[in-house]
Each structure stands twice: as structure tokens, then as C-alpha cells.
């Protein structure tokens, strides 16, 4: 729960002015937060839709695609994504690119064949 939500929950009993003073927030900030609640809800719904698209692209790449490649895939599909949003949404959804080591891709004996040869 954030401070603004706390004020919204308790303002009838204690008053907005008193709660804002105690919590160290400006009353204008509280009223701005309350006025923009609908905008935040719309943005959150859009972020959830984008997260589903990102998760689908991430799954199709078997977890190998990071933010730049996922962004390119979304742009090819006609989705416009802001650079700040393209970093924030995958972090919130805990989507990370899997690191693939080159040592795993090489045959162990071929990799070590010339190692330490005279």
C-alpha cells in the first residue's frame, strides 16, 4: 500500500490535511493521485496486454531473446513501444534472456584437442 492509498482509506476519520502532514506528502499530490486513478488503471491494463505479447515472443524464442530482439519483434508486428516501457515491463514480469555458453555448443574433445599441444 502506498502513502496516497493510506490517506484515501483513512481521510474520513482523520482528515486529508492531518494525514498528509503526518506522512510528509503535499495535499496537492494526494489530490492529483486521486484524480489520475483512471489513467493509471488504463496504463496498467495496457502493460498487462504488452506483457502477454512479450511473454509470447520470449516463449517462442525459448527464452533466448532479450529486450532489443523482443522490441524488434514487437515493432515488426506493428506494436509501438517506448524505450523506458520496453525495459520496465519485462523486469516487472521477471522475463530474462537465458545466457548460452559457447562451451556447451562445442564438442568437448574438439575444444581441448589442441590445448597444451607442443
Image (cartoon, rainbow, N blue to C red):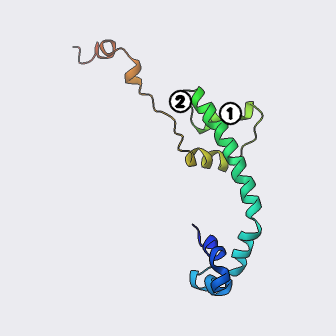
In three-dimensional space, the C-alpha distance between marks 1 and 2, rounded to whole angstroms, equals: 14 Å
Mark 1 surroundings: few (<14), some (14-19) or many (≥20) residues within 10 A: few
Residue 43 percent location from the top left of the image: 72, 53
Sequence-wise first label, 1 or 2: 2
Q: Which residue is mark 2?
A: 64
CB of mark 1 within 8 Å of CB of mark 2? Answer: no
The quarter of the rendered structure image containing the C terminus is top left
Residue 9's place in the image compared with 98, above or below, is below
Seen in the picture, residue 17 relative to 104 is either above or below; the reply is: below
Q: How many marks?
A: 2
- For this view, does 60 lie left or right of residue 109? right
Residue 2 coordinates in the image, percent (x, y) = 59, 68
Residue drawn at 72 percent across, 47 percent down: 46
The image position of residue 44, as x and y in percent, is 69, 52
Query: Which quarter of the picture shows residue 51?
Result: top right
Report the front residue among 105 and 32: 32
User: Residue 84, can we see it?
Assistant: yes
Answer above or below: position of 104 versus 58.
Answer: above
Q: Secondary structure at mark 2?
A: loop
112 or 116: nearer the viewer? 112
Q: Is residue 38 left or right of residue 108?
A: right
The N terminus lies in which quarter of the figure? Answer: bottom right
Residue 106 on image: x %, y %: 38, 17
> Foreground: 58 or 44?
44
Which class describes the residues within 10 Å of circle 2: few (<14), some (14-19), or many (20+)? some
| Left or right placement of residue 114 versus residue 81 in this view | left
- Residue at the spot x=33%, y=16% of the render? 111
Identify the residue position indicated by label 1 in the image: 72
Residue at 76% of width from left, 65% of height from top?
Answer: 36
* Tag 1 secondary structure: helix
Amino acid at each position: 500500500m502506498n502513502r496516497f492509498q493510506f490517506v484515501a482509506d483513512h481521510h474520513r476519520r482523520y482528515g486529508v490535511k492531518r494525514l498528509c502532514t503526518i506522512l510528509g506528502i503535499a495535499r496537492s499530490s494526494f489530490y492529483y493521485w486521486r484524480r489520475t486513478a483512471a489513467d493509471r488503471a488504463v496504463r496498467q491494463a495496457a502493460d498487462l496486454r504488452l506483457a502477454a505479447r512479450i511473454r509470447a515472443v520470449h516463449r517462442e524464442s525459448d527464452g533466448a531473446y532479450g529486450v532489443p530482439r523482443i522490441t524488434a519483434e514487437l515493432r515488426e508486428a506493428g506494436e509501438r513501444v517506448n524505450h523506458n516501457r520496453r525495459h520496465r515491463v519485462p523486469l516487472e514480469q521477471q522475463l530474462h534472456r537465458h545466457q548460452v555458453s559457447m562451451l556447451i555448443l562445442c564438442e568437448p574433445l574438439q575444444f581441448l584437442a589442441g590445448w597444451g599441444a607442443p
